[in-house]
Amino acid sequence: MNGFPGLRRGLITLVTITLVWLPGTAGAAQPARTAAPDQRQAVQHSDTAPQLQRRLDAVHEAGMPGIQAAFRRGERSRAAAAGVADTRTERPLRAGFHHRVGSVTKTFVATAVLQQVEAGRVELDAPVGRYLPRLVPGERGRRITVRMLLNHTSGIADYADVLFASTTRGSLADLDENRFRHHSPAELVATGLDQPATNAPGASWSYSNTNYVIAGELLREVTGQSPRHYVTREIIHPLGLRNTYFPGSTPFVLGPHSKAYEALYQLPERRGEYSVYDMSWARSAGALISTPAELNRFYRALFRGKLLSEDGLAEMRRTVPVPGSTGMRYGLGLMRFDAGSCGTLWGHEGKVWGMSTLSLHSTDGSRQLSYGMNLTDYQRLDESGSPIPHPIDRRLQELQNDVLCGAGGSGSGPSRTPEQHADRGLALVGTP
């Protein structure tokens, strides 16, 4: 669009470029004010430290200002970081710094909705208009089901395309304009509904943050609590996630954190810095703050039956095809990746302006990797507007292959190019 079609593929670019397995690659509530849990984890199992640190250092040396990661393989776990949290002061990035995780929020919210399904308050295949007739009125309210919201087959357009339309022109103007603007759920949903439908309800997959703002309002309707409070009470607190929280009305990350740099495919004259941002634009679609180690803890609990019954988890893992992709499918707030000899991986990616996240896990949660970075859209675009793989992307491939396949393991999973995905995440058309 407007000469930059690649800008409309945004968020999943993180996955489509970096989740390319390299055969033969060796080694591929109130938040706590400190990152003590992750820092303690960082000193465990010192035999794994050099391997992870080497890979993170390589990502930093390839051009990423800062990256932090946490992995688990069996009973071995490790958290580490490389690079800087602030490019001006060169303040180092540390493992356990608080990080905006973008669309990884969707897995938390989908889990919360499925808890209400198990409690008998919500039916997955009931029309959303049964619960929210004013928010989603008319024929759409009668035809779009709760399941269609959670697996992105509703056909409702993404409001983020409208809020941040200047990105399609290579401009940061809309990002700056919305930095301190408050957005209500009704406003966001109305913006999405006002755009032409992407497809008939249930006919195809099309990523939209609007779906998950509606899902959050569904939680509000059936529980009598805001989605932020429900997820905190029923998921975050029971799992002891001390550094995982919704920021609420504050634009600040409340714990130790890095800056958030947005390059917008090297098109603007300067990078934007967006660590201070009113996240009401993302809400239950992507406002969560967490750490890589705590994301691993959440997904491990989810996949081991601590948050949902076996039937509930099975529903979450019922996937639909992602158009243009042979290796990725989407469930209810879950992405599924077929990663060749590394097996099936589940999780989600996320991106908000200046911060990106990828969280990947084996089916039983025994192999886990979550990482966060503080520079987004660092690639340049080719003549068709598609991102050109950057040296950072190859280093991320090696990190993923090393940690999830094991040193010396080979990954023969699907090789995908950025244009093969239509997902559009929080930040762009396609987040986290």
Image (cartoon, rainbow, N blue to C red):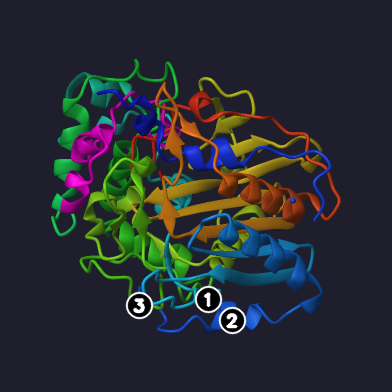
Which residue occupies the foreground of this view, 319 or 264? 264
Q: Which residues are magenta?
A: 147-176
- Residue 312 drawn at (x, y percent): 56, 44
Q: Is residue 151 visible?
A: yes
Per the image, the residue denoted by label 2 is 39
Q: Report the amino acid beneath label 3.
A: Gln
Labels 3 and 1: the sequence-earlier one: 3
Which residue occupies the foreground of this view, 396 or 372? 396
- Element under disc 1: loop
- Residue 200 drawn at (x, y percent): 34, 15
Comparing marks 1 and 2, which lies closer to the viewer?
Answer: 1
What residue appears at the point 62 percent right and 71 percent down from the top-left corner?
80
Give above or below for 293 relative to 315: below
Kindly check if marks 2 and 3 are in contact, taking CB atoms under 8 A apart as contact.
no
Kindly check if marks 3 and 1 are in contact, taking CB atoms under 8 A apart as contact.
no
Mark 3 → mark 1, Cα distance in angstroms: 21 Å
Comparing marks 2 and 3, which lies closer to the viewer?
Answer: 2
Which residue occupies the foreground of this view, 348 or 80? 80
- Element under disc 2: helix
Residue 69, by quadrant, is bottom right
Per the image, the residue denoted by label 3 is 30
In the displayed orientation, state which residue is furthest to the front: 269
**For residue 94, which numbered disc appears in the image?**
1
Q: Report the amino acid beneath label 1.
A: Arg
